[in-house]
Image: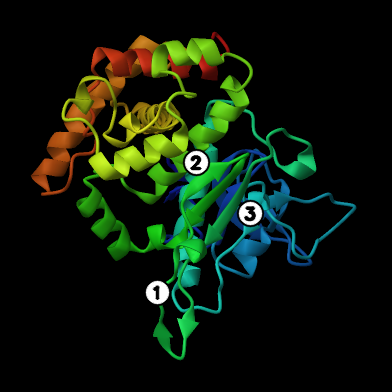
Amino acid sequence: MKLFTCRCGNSLFFDNVMCVACGSETGWCPHCKSTSALVPDQNNLYRCGNAECQTLLQKCYNYSDMKVCTRCVEVNANGGFLAGVLCDCCQFNAVIPDLSLDGNLDKWARLEAAKRRLFYTLDLLHLPYGNAAQGFVPPLSFDFKGDSLPDRGQWRSMNDEEQVFTGHADGKITINIKEADPIELEIARVQLGERRRTVIRHFRHEIGHYYWEVFVNHKCENECMAIFGDHNNPAYQDALLRYYAEGPPANWADNCVSGYATMHPWEDFAETFALYLDMVATLDTANYFGMLAQPLDLTDFEAMLSGFIHTGLVMNEMTRDMGLVDYTPEVIVQPVHDKLLFIHGLVNNTV
């Protein structure tokens, strides 16, 4: 992710809603694709503060009213302000958290922040996606749900039928909102030994399942099976039960990016896809700040991987200097290299 510039010359970050130097409101302009100052216009409208853009905008409803978004929507000068309009990111929400429960608004905001970064990377790679209203198959949508309900002022436990499981099915990505609770997330990360368990990693993993449907299903399944294994055998449910009963094999790092990737070829694909998005996001930032030996070329896989490994080594030492977990804990062995290369081919339409 790069930095952006306010009309006053101050640097702006991707998630900024205000310039700390001049006090201007800021937001994401979909026309010039940057975080810019919002110059007030008439009737609750704004002009993009980028002098080369100045597109007429209004805030996404989830920005203006719910305070969980930072994006704006282009306005037709003849149409004017539209009540309740959602941005190109929020329009993919099918279910939002129950906002009558304390803390859920903050959790939703954390989920939306991660989702915006996901879409930024998808757009950077020019990956296709769309919702049902746009006629895209499979239609992408998001459900953000919790599995706890208040009962007489206390939290009650839920049975299996009432629990919400983070996952993907036919284009619908469901995220249990407890993943946006920092304490719950850290407990799960430590207990499950998942060093990459973060909110953004959940999105990148689940979108990997979505792109298996987009790129692989009924298209290049044989080629995918040659790299990741036969997704028909064992059956997914059988593989799931085995994994949670036995855990990953001791030598999982010889072939996979994570222990969870050993559960089933679909999970191996999703974990590898998530790592590919991690790599692209890291390289995009490293490129902007001059950390790469050569300019970023998202079509050159070997150069991308080399840059990612180098940047990861630097970042790992920096995080260790601060007593934090490694920025890039993965070791790219040859089987993982080949799986990433396959993902790269899908993204670049060369498979």
Left or right of residue 220, residue 314 in this image: left
Q: Mark 3: which secondary structure? A: strand
Task: Estimate the spatial distance between the alpha carbons at disc 2 and disc 1, rounded to whole Å.
Answer: 32 Å
Coloring basis for residues: rainbow
**Mark 2 residue type:** Leu
Instruction: Identify the residue shown where x is 54% and y is 58%.
Output: 144
Asked which secondary structure carries label 2, the reply is helix
The residue indicated by pointer 1 is 157
Above or below, 242 against 165 in this view is: above
Q: Secondary structure at mark 1?
A: loop
Q: Are marks 3 and 1 in contact (CB under 8 Å)?
A: no
Quarter of the C terminus within the rendering: top right
Residue nearest the observer in this picture, 209 or 56:
209
Viewer-proximal residue, 92 or 228?
228
Q: Residue at x 55, y 8 (%)?
A: 350
Q: Which residue is mark 2?
A: 118
Residue at the spot of label 3: 93
**Residue at 28 percent of width and 26 percent of height:** 291
Vertical arrangement, residue 38 with respect to residue 172, above or below? below
Residue 296's x, y, as percent? Answer: 40, 19
Q: Please provide percent x and percent y for residue 3.
A: 43, 41
Label 3 or label 1, whichever comes before in sequence order: 3
Mark 2 or mark 1, whichever is nearer to me: 1
Residue 268, placed above or below residue 190: above
